[in-house]
Image: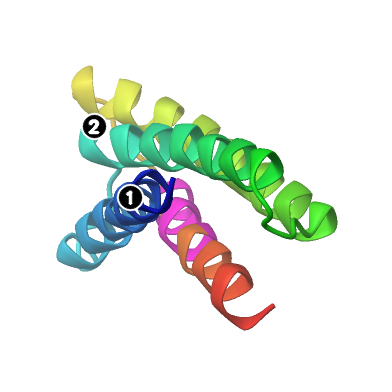
Amino acid sequence: MDFLHNFLVFLHILGAAIIVGLWIARIKNPTVLPGQFHGALLQLVTGLALVAVNEMGDGDVNHMKVGIKLLITLVIAVLAFIGQRRYKKDEKVSPALANGVGILAVINIAVATMW
């Protein structure tokens, strides 16, 4: 069970790194890349799996924190989905949308580490 938990944490952090890394890489010309949407989905799936694993084991789950992180992740996923669809159609992705994805990902990381 420890290996599964650690592997899910690894994938969860990797999803955050994809979102934030691509955002920082394109900070001068902000856009939403398809990888950011995939990173958001990875975070969503692994986050839910982590909660399930912790609920099954002896882990203590802070449901308020999980709920807030889930809400933020859902917003990130929706914004990233909209942005990556525009990117794929060669339409302009607004800087507010692109920066929203990156900033919300950083906020989600802050909630995870500082709460």
Which x, y percent locates residue 99? 42, 59
The residue segment tinted magenta is 96-104
Q: In this view, does 50 lie above or below 22?
A: above
Give the answer, above or below, for where 52 lies relative to 19.
above
Q: Quadrant of residue 52?
A: top right
Residue 70 spot, x, y in % from top left: 66, 44
Residue at 63% from the left image edge and 48% from the top image edge: 54
Q: In this view, does 19 lie to the left or right of 94?
A: left
Residue occupying image coordinates x 69% and y 77%: 115
Most foreground residue, 78 or 7: 7
Q: Which amino acid does label 2 sit on?
A: Pro
- Label 1 and label 2: CA atoms lie apart by 29 Å
Between 75 and 46, the one lying in front of the other is 46
Magenta stretch encompasses residue 62: no
Element type where label 1 sits in the image: helix
> Which residue position is annotated with label 2?
34
Quadrant in the picture for the N terminus:
top left
Residue nearer the viewer, 11 or 56? 56
Q: Name the residue under label 1.
A: 3
> Helix or strand or loop: what does disc 2 sit on?
helix
> Mark 1 or mark 2, which is nearer to you?
1
Q: Pinpoint residue 47: horizontal percent, then vertical percent.
A: 53, 43
Q: Does the CB distance between marks 1 and 2 fall below 8 Å?
A: no
Q: Earlier in the sequence, mark 1 or mark 2?
A: 1
Decide whether the magenta segment is chiefly helix, strand or loop: helix
Name the residue type under label 1: Phe
Residue at coordinates 30% horizontally, 55% vertically from top-left? Answer: 10
